[in-house]
Image (cartoon, helix red, strand yellow):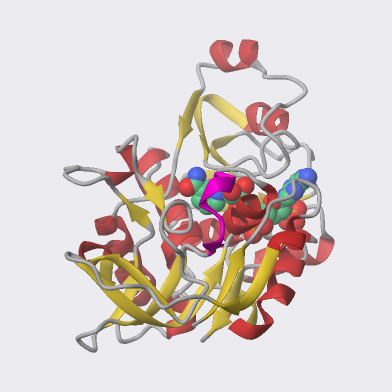
Amino acid sequence: MLAAYAVSQSPTDPLSGLVVGQRPDPAARPGWSVVKLRAAGLNHHDVWSLRGTGLPADRLPMVLGCDGAGVDEAGNEVIVHAVVPSDGWVGDETLDPARTLLSELYDGTLAEYVAVPSRNLVPKPAGLSFEHAACLSTAWLTAYRMLFVNAGLTPGATVLVQGAGGGVSTALTQLGSAAGYRVWTTSRDEGKRARALEIGADQAFSPGERLPERVDAVMETVGAATWSHSVNSLRPGGTIVISGATSGDAPAKAELTKIFFKQLRVVGSTMGTRSELERLANFVVHQGITPVIDSAFALADARRGFEKMVAGDVFGKVVFTI
Ligand SMILES: NC(=O)c1ccc[n+]([C@@H]2O[C@H](COP(=O)([O-])OP(=O)(O)OC[C@H]3O[C@@H](n4cnc5c(N)ncnc54)[C@H](OP(=O)(O)O)[C@@H]3O)[C@@H](O)[C@H]2O)c1
């Protein structure tokens, strides 16, 4: 089958280890299903894998990709849930210390076929295209859990989303505005700030800009570059939900004094559960949300999508059609 896969890793030249070519079809195994993919989404996770973060080198070659939607062996249209718990795990799979994401231990979704545990298949609502459904498994699920499980917000709250353009960030803006939150966002790029307003942000600011008032919660995926601004932007008792650190995880200042003095909550968040993915898909359809797609490429042209992400030249999701 055609697949985009990692053959080597480089922290400074991640695309040097990317190959788009032939890999063996996945083998059937008890309790697992093989999905014929129709669309797959790119995440920063795939770039981290090529940089050598999170994917041990001894597991290469590895088919990349966590997001996907397609058709299972019985003909059902499905969305693939990327969190694979260890055998026998019961409960919230994101809390299983031995969980993996597709493309970390088992081949991922940037391929014609993917094998996943059968319980990881979520029905694709009829009102959602394969391309839009393929946006949901990772960035959108992460945004859903950040906003609706971990932030402790109620409608009317003001939320700051750091870094307007990313897959998680655009999902946060679209989901937060649909849920009745006032969404403020920051971006390094004037064009992305303008587009954020079009998809539901109430105001958009330059990085580090002083806000008109302090916010109830900050959604962090940028990390070191925005950490101090996130802490300074919160009202006393406010919450930072952090799920990523694209610019690095060692901020110049940890802001410990402000965190305790203002009694802030710092909450880590990773992916979401299968049932949260199902609720997310239903929420997107019922609210008439169209996930923002930056660009769509045929899987054979996957390298072009990776290049855009590495360059930071994205607003929304990069999707591959299969
Ligand atoms: N924990 C989890 O389960 C989970 C799930 C999904 C993603 N993540 C992590 O979350 C992060 C975002 O993922 P993604 O797929 O949304 O990536 P992406 O689409 O590449 O998003 C990149 C975002 O980061 C911002 N950014 C990058 N470098 C920056 C810098 N130096 N200063 C300020 N902003 C910067 C960009 O903002 P502007 O260009 O608008 O300024 C953009 O919004 C990644 O680190 C990823 O690994 C974690």
Residue 251 against residue 83 in the figure, above or below: above
Residue 246 against residue 240 in the figure, above or below: below
Q: Is residue 104 left or right of residue 98?
A: right
Residue 193 against residue 22 in the figure, above or below: above
Query: Residue 58: horizontal and vertical position, in percent?
Result: 54, 47
Q: Is residue 37 left or right of residue 261?
A: left
Relative depth, front residue between 128 and 68:
68
At 82% across and 58% down in the image, what residue appears? Answer: 189
Provide the residue span drawn in magenta. 55-64
Relative depth, front residue between 101 and 151:
101
At 30% across and 52% down in the image, what residue appears? Answer: 273
Query: Residue 312: horizontal and vertical position, in percent?
Result: 76, 59
Q: Within the magenta stretch, is there residue 57?
A: yes
Q: Is residue 320 left or right of residue 79?
A: right
Q: Where is residue 18, by image quadrant?
A: bottom right
Q: Where is residue 308, by image quadrant?
A: bottom right
Query: Residue 259: horizontal and vertical position, in percent?
Result: 58, 17
At 30% across and 56% down in the image, what residue appears? Answer: 276
Asked if residue 55 can be seen in this view, the reply is: no
Q: Within the magenta stretch, is there residue 195?
A: no
